[in-house]
Amino acid sequence: MSDKKDEKISQQSNNEQLIANVPDFCFPKPAERPQQFSQAVSTIAPEKLNEYRSASAFMQAIAEEAMMWKQQLPENFKPAILAIINGGTQITVTGLAQVSFHGIRIEGTLNGAPCSLLVHQSTVQILCFGQEIVEQEERRPIGFIWPENEVEV
């Protein structure tokens, strides 16, 4: 029993020696932060702090992805987008637009008929696929709209 006790004391002293050799470092306490930092954060609008969550960021990411993907498609294919809404409803997309911080307007066709649907961005899945180009069809680009931006793919 004394061997285990001696071993534990020896290990504690080794740990103390290791800690003593570590240079002094500590994180500043919140009260020690520069005043400008806390003022800068408090003056940023909540929408700007959460911009990465917005429908605008979502629209931009989809548009960029579709443009990059378009370059990889064979010559006789074009990018097409299918919006799948909760419950399985599928809309062939002709346009996507931001209508509020989290809201998206999906324009397209549903069972061959034109439609426009407003959704929360978390309730839609976007599927990009290659659609073969048929010579008789007229060009119908997909539009993406978010603040101060409008892109056609």
Image (spheres, rainbow, N blue to C red):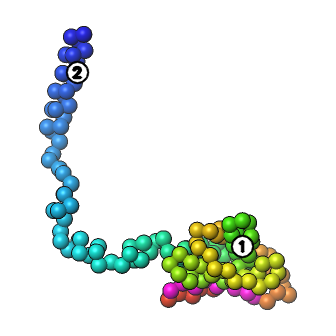
**Residue depicted at x 75% and y 88%:** 139
Mark 1 neighbour class, 10 Å CA radius: few under 14, some 14 to 19, many 20 or more: some
Find residue 6 and report its horizontal and vertical position in percent: 19, 16
Rendering quarter of residue 127 = bottom right
Residue 140 drawn in magenta: yes
Local secondary structure at mark 2: helix
Q: Earlier in the sequence, mark 1 or mark 2?
A: 2
Residue at 23% in and 71% down? 38
Tag of residue 8:
2
Number of numbered markers: 2
Q: Is residue 21 magenta?
A: no
Q: Which residues are magenta?
A: 139-147
Position of residue 66 in the picture relative to residue 7 (left or right): right
Q: Which residue corresponds to the image point at 18% horizontal and 34% vertical from the top-left?
A: 18
In the image, is residue 141 above or below residue 21? below
Residue 129: % across, % down: 72, 70
Amino acid at circle 1? Leu
Q: Position of residue 67 (x, y in %)?
A: 61, 77
Q: Left or right of 151: which side holds 136?
A: right
| Foreground of the two, 143 or 110 | 110
Q: Which mark is residue 82?
A: 1
- Amino acid type shown at disc 2: Lys
